[in-house]
């Protein structure tokens, strides 16, 4: 994967800006001996924002920008002058990017639309100036609020390709050949295992000017959910597909067994994948006669839609498109297509990314760092005001 620009997993360090401190200034003028407090409020710290961009197809740009820091808000000034807000930092990501906490693996956010913005880390609120605390019994408060602290978090970004149909099969099952036959995509096709080294998408033309998206991932082998082969690294892309097309070649020793193995690996990776619509395509069927087709069909589950195809001769491709279109638009499938992200665990992580060491400038010792457990709208109240006396 070192020589490809397709990066679908990256770990970065984000930090929002801290809020500016409120001012403790008092109004001074020649003929106003007791002008009273007029310290302004501090500015808000910058947010960390994720924005979906359909023109980006990889997370490569974040490989070279590991630290995303927003700027701090400025302190308030005299005359109730508000401090300047910190600048937000917007991270452009491909549509289909999921965000996880790098420490716990907890799912945080999901970017599924172009232009969608998600506030990943909120900037600290600015502190109130001393004029807010003036009362009839305390006309000259000599204290103001400090700004809320920044939030720092290491996050993992996972790109999961958006596709209507996902191709699932062992190496050399004919997935790339099918994609090149029914779409304009040109994936690499060869006669050795793991020819496909990265996912690819193709738009399949259907009747009446309609179309759907088909996604091809590297082949899966038994034990992929435990880290064997390349399948584990790319199984995440299948999570976003509405329909799963299982592909088993006709010359397989046991077609039913291969199908069961593939289904088991997907279930072990994410049990929610079991709820997706499934279709089985028996590839390379040009070498079968009618008697063999009937014998194979009898061994397969009755409730599994099955079609015999040959990407080379075109046999069964029209029937396959019809079947996939019905499954994509079925009401049962739409109801079950709510995306549920499994949390990251050690099997689902990329070791070289997890071992990455951030060498960011630490916050000054007098700066507080807020965690998610501490953060709430009631955190900053009058009890946190600083009294210099």
Image: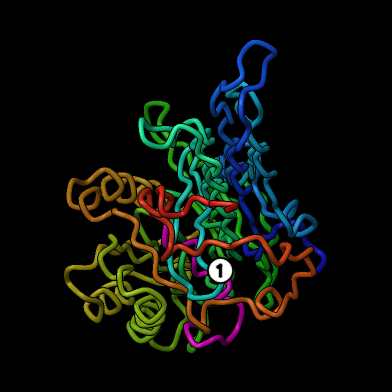
In the picture of the structure, the residue carrying the numbered disc 1 is 234
Label 1 Cα crowd, 10 Å radius (few <14 / some 14-19 / many 20+): many
Q: In what element is the residue under mark 1?
A: helix
Name the side, left or right, on which 124 lies relative to 14.
left
Q: Residue at x 56, y 46 (%)?
A: 123
Q: Quadrant of residue 267?
A: bottom left
- Name the residue at 61% across, 46% down: 93
Q: Residue furthest top?
A: 31
Residue toward you, 117 or 15: 15
Residue at point 54% right, 44% down? 143
Left of 46 or right of it: where is 212? left
Residue 187: image x %, image y %? Answer: 66, 56
Tell me if I can see residue 54 in this picture: no
Q: Is residue 239 magenta?
A: yes
Residue 147 appears left or right of 196: left
Query: How far across and how far down the image is residue 386, in percent?
Result: 54, 52
Q: Which residues are magenta?
A: 225-241
* Magenta span: chief secondary structure: helix
């Amino acid at each position: 994967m070192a020589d490809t620009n397709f990066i679908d997993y990256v770990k970065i360090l984000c930090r929002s800006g801290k809020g500016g401190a409120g001012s403790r200034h008092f109004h001074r003028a020649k003929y106003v001996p007791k002008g009273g407090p007029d310290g302004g409020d501090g500015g808000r710290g910058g947010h960390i924002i994720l924005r979906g961009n359909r023109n980006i197809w990889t997370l490569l740009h974040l490989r070279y920008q590991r630290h995303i820091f927003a700027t701090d808000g400025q302190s308030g000034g005299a005359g109730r002058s508000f401090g300047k807000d910190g600048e937000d930092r917007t991270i452009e990501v491909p549509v289909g990017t999921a965000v996880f906490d790098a420490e716990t693996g907890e799912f945080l956010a999901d970017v599924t639309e172009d232009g969608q913005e998600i506030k990943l880390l909120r900037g600290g609120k600015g502190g109130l100036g001393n004029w807010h605390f003036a009362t009839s019994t305390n006309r000259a408060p000599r204290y103001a609020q400090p700004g809320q602290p920044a939030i720092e978090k290491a996050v993992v970004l996972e790109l999961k390709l958006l596709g209507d149909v996902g191709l699932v099969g062992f190496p050399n099952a004919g997935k790339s050949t099918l994609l090149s036959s029914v779409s304009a995509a040109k994936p690499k096709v060869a006669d050795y295992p793991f020819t496909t080294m990265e996912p690819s998408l193709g738009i399949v033309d259907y009747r009446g000017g309609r179309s759907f998206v088909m996604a091809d991932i590297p082949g899966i082998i038994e034990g992929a959910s435990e880290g064997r082969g390349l399948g584990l690294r790319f199984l995440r892309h299948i999570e976003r597909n509405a329909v799963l097309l299982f592909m088993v070649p006709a010359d397989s020793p046991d077609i039913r067994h291969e199908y069961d193995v593939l289904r088991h690996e997907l279930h072990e990776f994410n049990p929610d994948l079991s709820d997706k619509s499934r279709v089985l395509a028996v590839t390379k069927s040009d070498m079968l006669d009618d008697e063999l087709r009937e014998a194979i069909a009898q061994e397969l589950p009755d409730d599994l839609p099955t079609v015999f195809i040959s990407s080379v001769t075109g046999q069964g491709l029209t029937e396959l498109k019809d079947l996939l279109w019905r499954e994509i638009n079925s009401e049962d499938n739409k109801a079950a297509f709510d995306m549920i992200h499994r949390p990251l665990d050690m099997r689902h992580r990329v070791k070289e990314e997890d071992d990455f060491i951030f060498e960011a400038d630490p916050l000054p010792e007098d700066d507080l760092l807020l965690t998610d457990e501490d953060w709430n709208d009631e955190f900053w109240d009058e009890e946190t005001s600083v009294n210099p006396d």
